[in-house]
Image: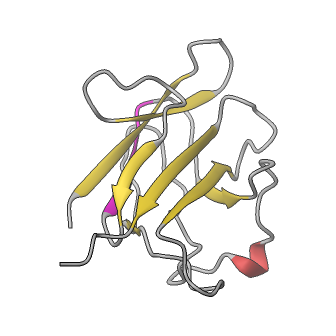
Amino acid sequence: MPDWSIKIVPSPTGGGAAFQPDLHGARPGDPLRTMQDDLVTWNNTTGQTHQPWPATPEWSPFPKDQVQRGTPNYLSDPIPAGQSSRPSYDVAQPTDTTPPPTTWTVYYVCALHPSVASERGTIVGTVYPSA
């Protein structure tokens, strides 16, 4: 299980921040491609606190009662400026459909700035192929 990092960077379009996979050649807004059970952290390089929060494909933040620390929907505690996220996010395969998907997308926004269009990101998860 690899560990991945997403940088929280100043938005290139001005105002707010953006989520950028910490990979050579990645740009703000690019999806992070992962495998099931990989671990993801966020590195806040901005001067403001941010908190990745799960959202619908239409970018509506999940209600707080659906996002509890220690559950699969929880991405991170608030991340102060210049800090890294805690806890790490485990890219868990969704189990709410039958059969479970082999590829899925986790949509997220900043819980503290949910209406800022640049503060949106995606993580694409894939199940490891069977041997």
Residue 18 image-quadrant placement: top right
Q: Is residue 67 above or below residue 110?
A: below
What's drawn in magenta, residue-wise? 39-45
In this picture, residue 50 sits left or right of residue 91 = right
* Magenta span main SS: strand
**Residue 36 at x, y = what percent?**
36, 70
**Residue 2 at x, y = what percent?**
20, 60
Q: Indicate yes or no whether the magenta region holds residue 52.
A: no
| Point 40% across, 64% down: residue | 86
| Point 39% across, 48% down: residue | 33
Residue 16 image-quadrant placement: top right
Front residue of 60/10: it is 60
> Which quadrant does the N terminus fall into?
bottom left
Q: Is residue 72 above or below residue 27?
A: below
In this picture, residue 96 sits left or right of residue 34 = right
Q: Is residue 10 above or below residue 2?
A: above
Q: Is residue 66 above or below residue 4?
A: below
Front residue of 36/41: it is 36
**Residue 15 at x, y = what percent?**
68, 18
Front residue of 127/78: it is 127
**Residue 6 at x, y = what percent?**
39, 42
What colouring style does the render use? secondary structure
Q: Residue furthest front?
A: 131
| Point 67% across, 28% down: residue | 118
> Which quadrant does the C terminus fall into?
bottom left
| Point 81% across, 48% down: residue | 58
In this picture, residue 125 sits left or right of residue 114 = left
Q: Indicate yes or no whether the magenta region holds residue 42.
A: yes
Total marks drawn? 0
Front residue of 101/51: it is 101
